[in-house]
């Protein structure tokens, strides 16, 4: 009964506050600001990529782009008199889904290079001026080194100390002789997220609560729209979308789908899938190595794969799920 009442409160609150404008603030304590830094940077990057702006090639995320949406997010957070604020902030805790990487990426490079050997042995500087300049300029730290790969290449996982445009940074690493590839560390999946649009006098934020999700899409959505004006006043524009289910029903987000063991030797178990599926395993150069199907989540007889990193793609009726897997 309490869950049903909660669901009804969400709907009533949204309807009662429609069109209400309240004074708010675009500042907050550091403990609150830090909650929205990643959201602001992700939304700024998505806006840059979506509109094809020149900053797409910039490793540093433009501060004005990030600050504009961060201030809007803080204004919604501070709009305590709007019941819809409690719905998106407190009840559903909606943030921008982290499918835009901000700090981690991987390189695939010739293991015979001196600078690669020095990275492996934690020797700094590495001996390559350009590599060292990138490591210093963007405060990169080696998080992992995988001493195996295809055609003599090894893999290094790097992490930056601050949020960056990992797509642009990866492109720079690709220009270094001996680097076969460089890729941001994307997080796969789907779920709640935020959308932004910038207008001449306000920022529009749409908070998306999603459910009935798999690892490529969500089938159900409910949205709350806010206009945040540059004087930090907030106007709730209303909510729309699918009816929010009573919490605890079968419409909740499905349990995570995982791979184990990873790293693996000969067999892999896909946990969380009860339906049959087909799959592909490709190497870091994009070459198909293994394909097949499974009725019970098991992938057997993978001993033909060399040691290294591969991409496992699982095909389901509602979409694809991709995993980075490591053969020991």
Image: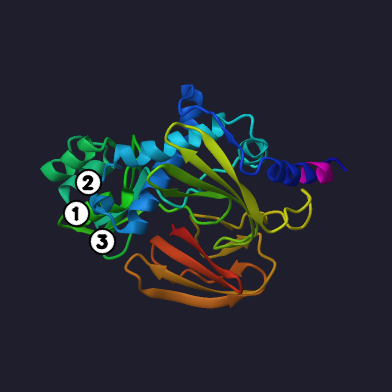
Q: Residue 112 carries which label?
A: 1
Can you identify the residue that label 3 sits on?
A: 152
Extent of the magenta region: 3-7
Q: Pinpoint residue 237: horizontal percent, then vertical percent.
A: 59, 46
Can you identify the residue that label 2 sits on?
A: 117
Dot 3 or dot 2, earlier in sequence: 2
Q: Pinpoint residue 109: horizontal percent, then vertical percent.
A: 24, 56
- Where 226 falls versus 112 (above or below)? above
Q: How is the image coloured?
A: rainbow
- Judged left or right of residue 12, residue 321 is left
Q: Do the residues labelled 3 and 1 touch (CB within 8 Å)?
A: yes
Q: Are marks 3 and 2 in contact (CB under 8 Å)?
A: no
Report the front residue among 28 and 323.
28
Dot 1 or dot 2, earlier in sequence: 1
**For the residue carrying disc 3, how many other residues have a C-alpha within 10 Å: few (<14), some (14-19), or many (20+)?**
few
- Where 54 falls versus 85 (above or below)? below
Specify the principal SS of the magenta part. Answer: helix
- Judged left or right of residue 289, residue 110 is left
Q: How far apart are marks 3 and 1 (CA)?
A: 8 Å
Quarter of the picture holding the N terminus: top right
Report the front residue among 105 and 31.
31
Q: Element under label 2? A: helix
Report the front residue among 93 and 73.
73
**For the residue carrying disc 1, how many other residues have a C-alpha within 10 Å: few (<14), some (14-19), or many (20+)?**
few
């Amino acid at each position: 009964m309490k869950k049903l009442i909660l669901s009804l409160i969400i709907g009533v609150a949204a309807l009662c506050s429609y069109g209400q404008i309240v004074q708010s603030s675009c500042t907050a304590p550091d403990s609150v600001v830090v909650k929205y830094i990643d959201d602001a940077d992700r939304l700024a990057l998505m806006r840059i990529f979506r509109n094809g702006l020149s900053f797409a090639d910039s490793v540093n995320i433009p501060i004005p782009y990030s600050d504009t949406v961060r201030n809007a997010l803080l204004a919604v957070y501070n709009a305590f008199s709007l019941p819809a604020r409690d719905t998106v902030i407190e009840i559903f805790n909606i943030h921008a889904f982290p499918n835009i990487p901000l700090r981690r990426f991987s390189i695939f490079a010739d293991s015979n290079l001196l600078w690669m050997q020095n990275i492996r042995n934690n020797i700094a500087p590495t001996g390559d001026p350009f590599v060292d300049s990138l490591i210093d300029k963007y405060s990169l730290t080696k998080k992992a080194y995988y001493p195996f790969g295809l055609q003599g290449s090894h893999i290094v996982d790097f992490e930056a100390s601050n949020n960056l445009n990992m797509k642009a940074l990866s492109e720079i690493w690709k220009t270094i002789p001996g680097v076969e590839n460089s890729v941001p560390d994307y997080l796969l999946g789907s779920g709640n997220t935020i959308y932004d649009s910038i207008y001449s006098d306000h920022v529009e934020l749409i908070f998306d609560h999603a459910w009935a999700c798999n690892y490529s899409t969500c089938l159900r959505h409910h949205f709350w729209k806010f206009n945040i004006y540059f004087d930090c006043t907030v106007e709730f524009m209303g909510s729309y979308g699918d009816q929010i289910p009573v919490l605890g029903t079968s419409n909740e987000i499905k349990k995570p789908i995982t791979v184990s063991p990873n790293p693996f030797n000969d067999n892999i178990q896909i946990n969380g899938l009860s339906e049959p599926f087909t799959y592909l395993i490709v190497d870091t150069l994009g070459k198909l190595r293994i394909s097949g199907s499974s009725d019970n989540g098991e992938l057997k007889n993978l001993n033909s794969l060399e040691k290294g990193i591969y991409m496992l793609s699982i095909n389901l009726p509602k979409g694809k799920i991709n995993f980075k897997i490591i053969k020991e």
